Image (cartoon, rainbow, N blue to C red):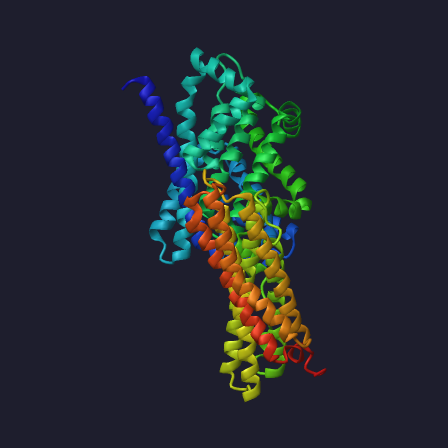
Amino acid sequence: MNETLQMIFGLIGGLAIFLFGMNMMSDNLQKAAGEKMKKVLAVMTRNPVLGVISGALVTAVLQSSSATTVMAIGFVSAGLMTLPQAISIIFGANIGTTMTAQLIAFKISDYIYPIIFIGFIISFLAKKEKVKYIGNTILSFGLLFLGIETMGSTMKPLASSPFFVDLIGKVAHTRLLGMLVGLMMTLVVQSSSATIAVLQNFASQALPGTTTSIIGLTGAIPVLLGDNIGTTITAILASLGQSRNAKRTAAAHCLFNVSGSILFLFLVKPYAALITRISPQGPEVEVISRQIANAHTGFNLTMTLVWTPLIYVMVKIVMKIIPLSAEEKAAENGAKYLDEASIHQPALALHLVCKEVAHCSDIVKEILTQLGTVTEKNLENITASVKDKSALEKTLSNQINDYVSRVFSAGTLTEEQASQATGVLFVLSDIDRISGYVTALLEKLASQTDGDAKFSGEAMEEIRLAGKNMGELYDKLMDYILAGREADETALRTDRASLLNQDERLKEDHIRRVARGECDSRLTGDYNFVLNTINRIGNSCVNLADFAAHRMDFQALLKEPDEA
């Protein structure tokens, strides 16, 4: 067989044996101790330091940072763990995963086959599953080293190839290139442990006629840094389709490794000198595997010491990178006053419902105030802000309706209280409609900004003024309803008439602008949608005006039950 092909097959075959052994060992360790390790993770996360320790411990036992990372992401996605707790575990997992490199640095080539044989015998003869898992773990441990030995023996001829030595020289002397090589290797193999094992074996090859490593520690460290960046892909893949906090956990893993790699890239020479001093002494090819393992451990220990006190800074960064959606913000800022324990106390429950409706009303006041300030320049920002507020109001409205339904189901309401509850929901339904109408109106306006046909400045000003007028009327109406002030029925009739006439006036103004060529006729349909939406907002205000005129005593319900 061609020598080059033989070398390639030996390298990929050795890598395959290594990965098989690595995965088999991790799987069997998880089966033997996985549930206990999950309990360790769940319990030992009361503070960041304990989280780091538990992450390191679990990863060292399971021999898989990927398994620990996936566990942490699963826990945070299920809501069983907070984001800071999950991030602290990820930090610890980065330390624990260096145990593999430390094991590889031991020279146990003479004992590989006895280890494989012992593992096979235990697995083959065992009756109990737990013992079988232990046997498989020992067997896979031997296979792991067999893969390393195969790769090492295959790589030896490379050290005498002038072309390859020259190529490696370029990688060794160009830090960024070395980092890219490590990154690409890990992305392809999907295991930083495997690529670091390859690096350790490769670095153990001597230049012809010397005991000097073909790449040296200063050349190996950038490749090692690239391996650390590449390993974050596992966390990213595990977070796909998961909650935002799961994605943030993966982002924290990336940030940890990327920030550390960039920092250490500028410190390669002094760091290599430090690792050389604290590692065993001897011919370079004999000790470089241990030096690389120590560099790997040192990197992760240092970055953990840097980031652990700053874990809440990390949380803020990843929350900025992956912000909450409008719906999640709404859920996070949910009902302030509703209390499950009060459902069977109707007077208190209705009081809390009224306070929550007042909370919704305040949000809609803000929404209408923003509509009254809209211009072509601030349209995009106001639309985004109103959508967030509307999502929060919608969530609160749903929570209130659900709460009142359960109060009714409890069967403790008197006839009068049932009537009051219905009246409160009547007010809430119009508050909710106004919120949705304003959002729809602004979204329609915003959709025109990218086209060649746009609403004229006069049209935008009319829409703004209509919003301002409705906001002022809404404030007045809710003041009547919530504060219990007596409504001025004459003023309310005037306001209702003004609102009902507004739609016709705005349509006539638009037709005049189209006739004068000031407005694009293609926008008539869209403008009519806006006017119809304004009309619907007006109708909801009319409904609230009727409610204010009939004067259900909302204010009495807002008083604390013991004050009433």
Estimate the x, y position of residue 271 in percent, counting from the top left: 65, 27
Q: In which quarter of the image is the N terminus?
A: top left
Estimate the x, y position of residue 60 in percent, counting from the top left: 53, 45
In the picture shown, does residue 166 fall above or below 44?
Answer: above
In the picture shown, does residue 13 fall above or below 59?
Answer: above
Q: Which residue is drawn at 62% across and 51% down?
A: 373
Determine if residue 39 is in view: no
Q: Residue at x 56, y 33 (%)?
A: 293
Q: Which residue is drawn at 44% across and 15% down?
A: 164
Q: Nearer the viewer, residue 195 or 503?
A: 503
Q: Residue at x 54, y 23 (%)?
A: 176
Residue 303 position by quadrant: top right
With 433 as the anchor, is 333 left or right in this view?
right
Determine if residue 112 is in view: yes
Q: Which of 254 and 424 is in front in this view?
A: 424
Residue 21 position by quadrant: top left
Estimate the x, y position of residue 54 in percent, counting from the top left: 58, 51
In the picture shown, does residue 344 fall above or below 380?
Answer: below
Estimate the x, y position of residue 116 in percent, counting from the top left: 39, 41
